[in-house]
Image: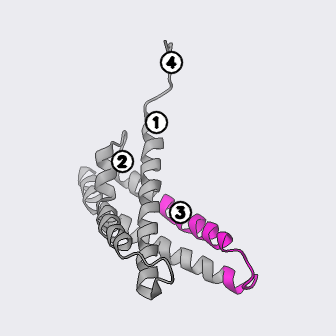
Amino acid sequence: MPSTRIAAKISSPFAYLAFLLAAMFVGLLTVRTLEAGPGPGSPIFLYIIADLLAGGTVLYAGGWALLSLEELAQPTILDHLRRCALLYLILVPLGVVLLAFANFGDPGGGGALATMLCVAAGCAIVIDASLLFVVRRRSDGPRTGSYT
C-alpha cells in the first residue's frame, strides 16, 4: 500500500482544490435555498453563517478523507503546506490584487467571484491547519508529568 499513500500525497493539493470548489458550490446552493425560503428581509449574517457551515462541512469531510488516504500518523507543517499548496497559490496573489484594486462599493461579478474564492481558500487553509493540529495533538498521547 505505499504506492497508494504516495499517490494520495502527490494528488492531495489537487483533491483539496476540488473539495474547495465543491464547498463553494454547496455554499452557493445553501444561500440560494435560504433566499427562496424566508424572504428578502433575512439578515445577511444568517446567509454567511449557513454558507460557512455548509462549505466548512464539505472541506472538513474532504480533509478527513485525504488524511485517511495519506495515512499520516503525526502530520507536520510541511504536510499542511503540501496539502494546501494550490490554495496558497490562489489566496496570496488574488488577495494582493483584491487589496490593491479594492473598490469597497459593489465589486461587480468578477470581483465578487474573486472575493468569494479568496475567502473560501482562506477558510480551507484554516480548516486544514486546525484538522492537522488536532490530529497531531491526539497522536502525541496523554500528557503526564509535572509542569514545573
Quick check: 13 above or below 148? Answer: below
Residue placed most toward the observer, 9 or 29: 29
Q: Main secondary structure of the magenta part?
A: helix
Marks 2 and 3: which is nearer the front? Answer: 3
Q: Secondary structure at mark 4?
A: loop
Query: Foreground: 7 or 57?
Result: 57
45 sits left or right of 61 in the view: right
Q: Nearer the viewer, mark 4 or mark 3?
A: 3
Residue at image mark 1: 137
Q: Amino acid at mark 4?
A: Thr
Relative to residue 39, is residue 56 drawn left or right?
A: left
- Quick check: is 87 in the magenta stretch? no
The residue depicted at 42 percent of the width and 39 percent of the height is: 136
Q: Is any part of residue 62 visible from this angle?
A: no
Tell me which label, 2 or 4, sits earlier in the chain: 2
**Label 2 amino acid?**
Glu
Residue labelled with disc 2: 71
Q: Earlier in the sequence, mark 4 or mark 3?
A: 3
The quadrant where residue 7 appears: bottom left
Type of amino acid at the residue the image marks with label 3:
Gly
Name the kind of residue labelled 1 in the image. Answer: Arg
The residue indicated by pointer 3 is: 56
> What kind of element bears circle 2?
loop
Q: Which residues are magenta?
A: 34-61
Q: Earlier in the sequence, mark 4 or mark 1?
A: 1
Mark found first going from the N terminus, 1 or 2: 2
Q: CA distance from mark 4 to mark 1?
A: 14 Å
Q: Is residue 133 visible?
A: yes
Kindly indicate whether the residue at mark 3 contacts the one at mark 4 (C-beta within 8 angstroms).
no
In the rendered image, the vertical position of residue 42 relative to residue 74, given as above or below? below
Q: Which residue is mark 4?
A: 144
